Amino acid sequence: MQIFLQPIFTRKRMNISIIKNNWEQLVGSYIAEQTLSLDIRKRILYINIKSGVIKYELSLQSEELMKRINELFPYPV
């Protein structure tokens, strides 16, 4: 079981690392500075933001943000 799950966890860590490394280019410097943490659970990106206004702004741009994130990978995340 551990051998089977290891690639899944490795891919998750790699995916979140790629997103974190490109976060400023994806959302801009101001939103990147306001971001507290990023995590992926069950193929959903969870973003912890300081400001409710920025959370709302990101919710309006969620489809565009998903497109930009998926362009970073050769497979959908």
Image (spheres, rainbow, N blue to C red):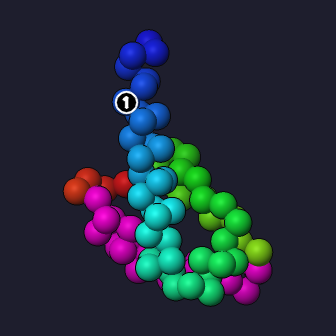
Q: Is residue 43 above or below residue 67?
A: above
Q: Determine which quarter of the picture holds residue 59.
A: bottom right
Q: Quadrant of the C terminus?
A: bottom left
Magenta span dominant secondary structure: helix
Residue 20 lies, in percent from the top left, at 51, 62
Residue identified by numbered label 1: 7
Disc 1, SS: helix
**Of 52 and 36, the residue lying toward us:** 36
Vertical placement of residue 60 versus 44, above or below: below
Q: Would you say residue 62 sits in the magenta stretch?
A: yes
Q: How far across and down, in percent of the image, does residue 2 sit?
A: 46, 15
Residue placed farthest to the left in the image?
74
Count every numbered label the image shows and give the total.
1
Look at the image and tell me in which quarter the N terminus lies: top left
Q: Residue at x 35, y 73 (%)?
A: 67
Q: Quadrant of residue 46?
A: bottom right
* Residue 28 in picture, x, y percent from top left: 52, 85
Q: Can the viewer see residue 55?
A: no
> Does the rendering let one see residue 39?
yes
The single residue placed furthest to the top in the displayed view is 1
Residue at the image point whose x is 43% and y is 24% from the top: 5
- What type is the residue that disc 1 sits on? Pro
State left or right for residue 34 relative to residue 17: right
State left or right for residue 38 relative to residue 75.
Answer: right
Which residue lies at the image location 44% right of the left edge and 69% below the top edge? 22
Q: Is residue 11 left or right of residue 52?
A: left
Residue 68 magenta: yes
The stretch of residues the image draws in magenta is 51-73
Question: How many other residues sit within 10 Å of disc 1, few (<14), some (14-19) or many (≥20)?
Answer: few
As drawn, is 12 to the left or to the right of 38? left
What is the x, y in percent for residue 69? 38, 68
Compared to residue 21, the image places residue 11 above or below, namely above
